[in-house]
């Protein structure tokens, strides 16, 4: 009889333990489901917000991909208005004329300095986002290679650069001043390279470069063969294709190429804009996309 009672006790204990395990499992599963439901509810009930981004022309392909990835990465309440891709000078002009934007990303520190001076952005939100390199490109299979600034000075090639509103053009002018192709004036007179703005000067006699209003258009001149070579960013080679790098402009001949970003002073969506700006810098997904399109993280 004692053995029977002992056997029954063991069976009862096992049954109790099984019930407890089942209860714990159900509780954990319930909590998991509640957490999932809570996350879904949070995403569903988050306030819809539309962000307007003004970005340097050279960011177009990368930014489109980043915005799509941001929405997919738990920000389904966010949409983006028709992002404006212009030269940094044009973007400042648009803000000055009253155009609305939440976020401004320029292709040069000087352009962002102007935006801050004019009150277009909140200086305290400004961050350096990317770096880039200035290169010399020609159409694919041109046969050119190892093109230098001195080659340009020697008149060996026709060339295209951005006009004064285009930061890539300013950097190119700075570099070309070191070989006498570009002549600084005003406050820059007597200086060269990174010590000048690359604005308000003139090209020396005998040099007649093709000028255009965006780095994208500059790249297209080389792509089509309108000119032998053009001065663009490394990222433009990824963005457009149809061109190849035939020379790299020495970094010490121009100012550092940095893309600053800042929230505009008129933004009605400061918190959402700050969250997007932070994600652009810190998200692994975003970093992969920027690097894919030729941008180095600052």
Image: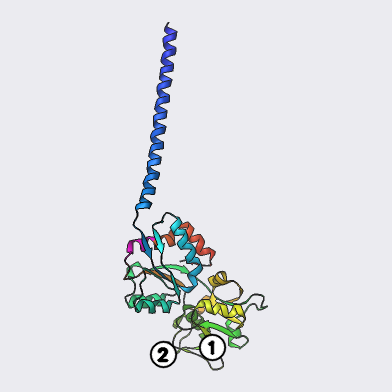
Q: Earlier in the sequence, mark 1 or mark 2?
A: 1
Q: Secondary structure at mark 2?
A: helix
Quarter that holds the C terminus: bottom left
**287 relative to 160, above or below:** above
Q: Secondary structure at mark 1?
A: loop
Q: Residue 231: image x %, image y %?
A: 55, 79
Q: Can the viewer see residue 249?
A: no
**210 relative to 248, above or below:** below
What residue sits right under mark 1 in the picture? 181
**231 relative to 37, above or below:** below
- Label 2 neighbourhood size at 10 Å, few (<14), some (14-19), many (20+)? few
Stretch in magenta? 268-275
- Label 1 neighbourhood size at 10 Å, few (<14), some (14-19), many (20+)? many
As for residue 235 lying within the magenta part, the answer is: no
What residue sits right under mark 2 in the picture? 186
As for residue 269 lying within the magenta part, the answer is: yes
> Which corner quadrant of the image does residue 138 belong to?
bottom right
**CB-based contact (under 8 Å), mark 1 and mark 2:** no
Q: Residue 119: image x %, image y %?
A: 31, 75
- View extreme (bottom): residue: 205
In percent of the image, x 41 and y 90: which residue is there? Answer: 186
Give the color scheme: rainbow, by chain, secondary structure or one colour.
rainbow
Q: Residue 17: image x %, image y %?
A: 41, 24
Is most of the magenta stretch helix, strand or loop? helix
Distance from disc 1 to disc 2, alpha carbons, whole Å, reads 17 Å
> Which corner quadrant of the image does residue 25 belong to?
top left
Quarter that holds the N terminus: top left
């Amino acid at each position: 009889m004692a053995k029977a009672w002992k056997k029954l006790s063991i069976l009862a204990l096992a049954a109790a333990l099984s019930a407890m395990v089942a209860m714990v499992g159900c509780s954990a599963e319930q909590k998991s489901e509640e957490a999932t439901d809570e996350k879904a509810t949070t995403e569903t009930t988050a306030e819809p917000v539309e962000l307007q981004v003004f970005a340097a022309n050279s960011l177009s392909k990368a930014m489109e991909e980043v915005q799509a990835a941001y929405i997919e990465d738990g920000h389904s309440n966010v949409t983006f208005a028709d992002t404006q891709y212009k030269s940094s000078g044009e973007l400042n002009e648009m803000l000055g004329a009253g155009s609305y934007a939440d976020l401004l990303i320029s292709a040069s520190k000087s352009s962002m300095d102007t935006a801050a001076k004019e009150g277009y952005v909140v200086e305290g939100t400004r961050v350096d986002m990317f770096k880039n390199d200035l290169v010399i490109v020609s159409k694919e299979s041109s046969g050119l290679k190892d093109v230098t600034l001195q080659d340009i000075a020697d008149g060996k090639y026709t060339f295209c650069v951005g006009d004064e509103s285009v930061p890539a053009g300013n950097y190119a002018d700075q570099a070309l001043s070191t070989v006498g192709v570009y002549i600084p004036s005003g406050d820059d007179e007597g200086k060269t390279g990174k010590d000048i703005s690359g604005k308000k000067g003139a090209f020396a006699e005998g040099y007649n470069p093709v000028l255009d209003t965006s780095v994208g258009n500059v790249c297209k001149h080389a792509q089509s063969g309108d000119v032998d070579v053009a001065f663009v960013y490394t990222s433009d080679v990824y963005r457009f294709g149809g061109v190849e790098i035939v020379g790299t402009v020495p970094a010490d001949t121009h100012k550092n190429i940095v893309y600053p970003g800042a929230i505009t002073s008129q933004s009605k969506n400061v918190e959402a804009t700050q969250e997007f700006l932070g994600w652009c810098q810190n998200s692994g997904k975003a970093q992969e996309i920027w690097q894919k399109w030729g941008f180095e993280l600052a």
